[in-house]
Image (spheres, rainbow, N blue to C red):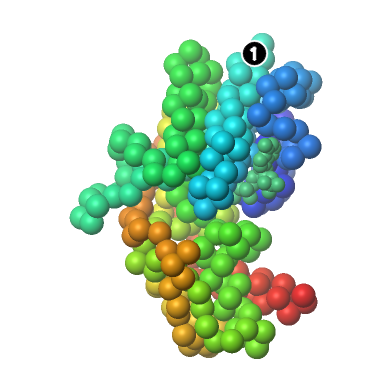
């Protein structure tokens, strides 16, 4: 089996490519050298490689960046997905396309609501989330016309190597700097009351591998732990692990309204037997270690 991975040098791609190789795939990875929103370039590559599966990870993946760059976000995330779907659809051989969407497509739940299911309404609240929801609906259209598409709505995932524009790496970096004496014991954070559903990136990669198996029915799948945790709790774990107790300052620039996002991945579990394996405190510990190495080497 030959896999084409777009966004192969991104955080998920760097974790996914070795896992695909270990599972016996021959992998072709592309990143910025292929402009994903250029349909002719993507079509040329897909016709040349003729992959059996395509995992489409290339994206502008940050909600924060999407506010400042909504057009670029839409171009990369929506038109980029369109290029990939169109090229796959023109292949005269079977190909499964994994289109990676986001929990953010659902927006925020209200307290007391059950976890989001695949049938929950899409109520995206940022340019990033709208670009992913639009790409998801487009992919559903290709699926109706016969393309073998798996649409994933991935809840938050993190781990060592993720950039600190995302919340937990931003926490881990600051805690690492404080514990290495490189920063005053003061943390700058956003809204710690938001409740999110976090997975270790390796559990997300394991889910994608199962979703690439031809025996898994195509369709739409949440990839989620099912557990909601306030960000404050993850911060406290990082403090405990590092043995620090800094002053925590809310930075109005980082503060976004409280959101509540927990996913139900029952469909994925029933279809594939997938279950998350990594205890999340272990993920936080490895992130802290990785940031300590980075900041003390800098
Ligand atoms: O933005 P860069 O320079 O880090 O490059 C990213 C790349 N990328 C592109 N590739 C080709 N054409 C473009 N117009 C384009 N724009 C961005 O895709 C990066 O190397 C990769 C995406 O990696 P990350 O930003 O690290 O995302 P991550 O965490 O790997 O997420 C993968 C997927 C995305 O669809 C997320 O929205 C979703 O999982 O959660």
Front residue of 241 and 67: 67
Q: Residue 43 at what x, y percent from top left?
A: 71, 20
Residue at position x 69%, y 26% in the image: 38
- Residue at the image point whose x is 57% and y is 39% from the top: 73
Task: Looking at the picture, tell me which residue is in the foreground, 247 or 204.
Answer: 247
**Could you tell me if residue 43 is visible in this image?**
yes
Q: Residue at x 62, y 30 (%)?
A: 80
Left or right: 59 with respect to 223? right
Location of residue 271 (image quadrant): top left
Q: Does residue 244 lie above or below 132 as drawn? A: below
Element marked by disc 1: helix
Q: Is residue 59 left or right of residue 275?
A: right
Asked which quadrant contains residue 159, the reply is bottom right
Percent position of residue 181, x then y: 65, 88
Q: Is residue 2 above or below residue 128?
A: above
Image quadrant assignment for residue 70: top right
Residue 198 location in percent, x, y? 45, 58
- Which residue is denoted by mark 1 in the rendering? 90
Q: Quadrant of ligand 1?
A: top right
Residue at left 34%, top 67%?
193
Name the quarter where the C terminus is drawn.
Answer: bottom right
Where's residue 203, x and y in %?
A: 53, 53
Q: Residue furthest left?
A: 112
Residue 137 in the figure: left or right of residue 160: left
């Amino acid at each position: 089996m030959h896999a084409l991975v777009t966004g192969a040098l991104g955080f998920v791609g760097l974790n996914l490519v070795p896992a695909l190789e270990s599972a016996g795939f021959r992998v072709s990875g592309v990143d910025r050298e292929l402009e994903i929103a250029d349909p002719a370039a993507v079509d040329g590559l897909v016709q040349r490689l003729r992959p059996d599966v395509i995992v489409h990870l290339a994206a502008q993946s940050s909600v924060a960046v999407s506010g400042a760059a909504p057009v670029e976000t839409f171009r990369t995330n929506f038109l980029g997905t369109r290029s990939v779907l169109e090229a796959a659809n023109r292949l005269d051989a079977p190909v499964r396309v994994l289109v990676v969407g986001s929990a953010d497509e659902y927006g925020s739940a209200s307290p007391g609501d059950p976890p989001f299911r695949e049938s929950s309404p899409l109520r995206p609240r940022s340019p990033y989330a709208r670009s992913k929801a639009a790409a998801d609906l487009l992919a559903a259209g290709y699926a109706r016309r016969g393309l073998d598409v798996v649409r994933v709505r991935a809840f938050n995932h993190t781990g060592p190597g993720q950039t600190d524009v995302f919340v937990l790496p931003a926490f881990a970096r600051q805690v690492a700097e404080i514990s290495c004496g490189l920063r005053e014991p003061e943390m700058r954070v956003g809204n710690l009351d938001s409740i999110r559903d976090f997975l270790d990136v390796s559990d997300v990669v394991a889910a994608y591998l199962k979703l690439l198996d031809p025996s898994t029915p195509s369709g739409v799948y949440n990839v989620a732990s099912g557990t909601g945790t306030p960000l404050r709790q993850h911060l406290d774990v990082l403090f405990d692990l590092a043995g620090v107790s800094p002053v925590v300052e809310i930075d109005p620039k980082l503060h976004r309204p409280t959101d509540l996002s927990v996913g139900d991945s029952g469909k994925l579990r029933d279809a594939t037997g997938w279950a998350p394996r990594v205890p999340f405190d272990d993920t936080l510990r490895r992130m802290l270690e990785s940031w300590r190495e980075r900041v003390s080497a800098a």
